Amino acid sequence: MQSARMPVTALPLDNRRIIVTRPEEQAGEIAEEIRRLGGTPVVLPMIRILPVEDTSELDRALQQLENIDAVIFTSLNAVRHTMKRAALLGIGGTAWDGKEVYAVGSRTAHVAREYGLKVDVVPAIHSGAELAASISSRPLRGKRVLFPRGNMGRDDALQAAVAAGAEVIPVVAYSTAGPEESVGRRMRQELLERASSLVIFASPSAARHCAQLFTEEEQMIVRNRLVVAAIGSTTRDAVLSVHWPVQILADEATGHGMVSAITKYIHTHSHA
């Protein structure tokens, strides 16, 4: 007598292809979460994070850390490239003791702590605007604030620190470049040849570089086929600025937070 087969429970992302546009080395968490829920992650990095060619500005700022009161990190890339450069200059973790550290979100704060930094301020919602609001309420008047950034970074947090009365030292710690040519070709195929696509954007520059792969006529085609998941209001605004839709907004910059928002959207629309 054959035993009755247990019904197979469908996973939330079964048969879903989801394009992840983060750099390869940062896409693992989201890709793993997508697989865990039955989906297929397609990693097509729309940006490459590169060291700056001229580090003299960053070096000078790091060599004068004793005169710095606070540091603002608006991305995990800013943390990694700043701390790696500090290590190459022989500047150890104790040099950061007593500095007030601001991080744009939980992932950035986590990376900062991995380097031994004590993080003082993390906004509840991951976005440059929320970090700027947090900075505005802090007693920064007369303090010297280091602001390591990318070459394409936004100025919300910087302007908030200046408005709070701080002396801000902005330095470029890394540069952002567009996708490899072969990756750009694959993205064009994904968005032009499939009936619909779900794409995750985690940064404004990824959204802008992706949009630049298409002509105006092609963008109209893509726009009608696209479901976009954006991390944070800053990224959402960048996607909207290129006239693409944003159907899913995740406030949490973790893989779990992003994929939870996608799962909720798919569940809601499949039962509509």
Image (cartoon, helix red, strand yellow):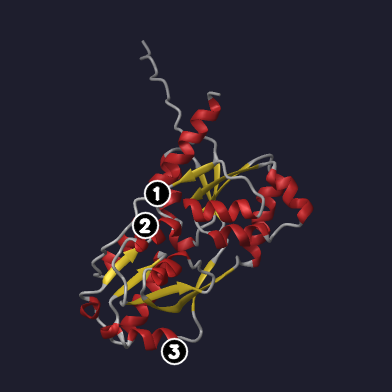
The quadrant of the picture occupied by the N terminus is top left
Quadrant of image for the C terminus: top right
Q: Position of residue 193 (x, y in %)?
A: 71, 46
Q: Is residue 191 above or below residue 9?
A: below
Question: In the shown orientation, is residue 22 left or right of residue 188?
Answer: left
Callout 2 crowding tier (Cα within 10 Å): few <14, some 14–19, many ≥20: many
Instruction: Look at mark 3 in the image and give the residue it sits on.
Output: 56
Disc 1 from disc 2: Cα separation: 8 Å
Work out whether mark 1 precedes mark 2 in sequence or the reverse, and give the earlier one. Answer: 2
Query: Residue at (50%, 62%) from the top-left corner?
Result: 23
> Disc 1 vs disc 2: Cβ atoms closer than 8 Å?
yes
State the separation of the CA atoms marked 3 and 1: 35 Å
At numbered mark 1, what does the secondary structure look like: helix, strand or loop?
loop
Task: Say which amino acid is labelled 2.
Answer: Gly
Q: Amino acid at mark 3?
A: Ser
Of callouts 3 and 1, which one flags the residue occurring earlier in the amino acid sequence?
Answer: 3
As drawn, the label of residue 252 is 1
Q: Residue at x 51, y 66 (%)?
A: 154
Q: In terms of secondary structure, where does tag 2 sit?
A: loop
Percent across and percent down for residue 32 are 42, 48
Mark pair 3, 2: CA separation: 28 Å
Q: Residues within 10 Å of mark 1 (few under 14, many from 20)?
A: many
Quarter holding residue 26? bottom left
34 above or below 187?
Answer: above
Residue hosting label 2: 105
Q: Is residue 260 above or below residue 187?
A: above
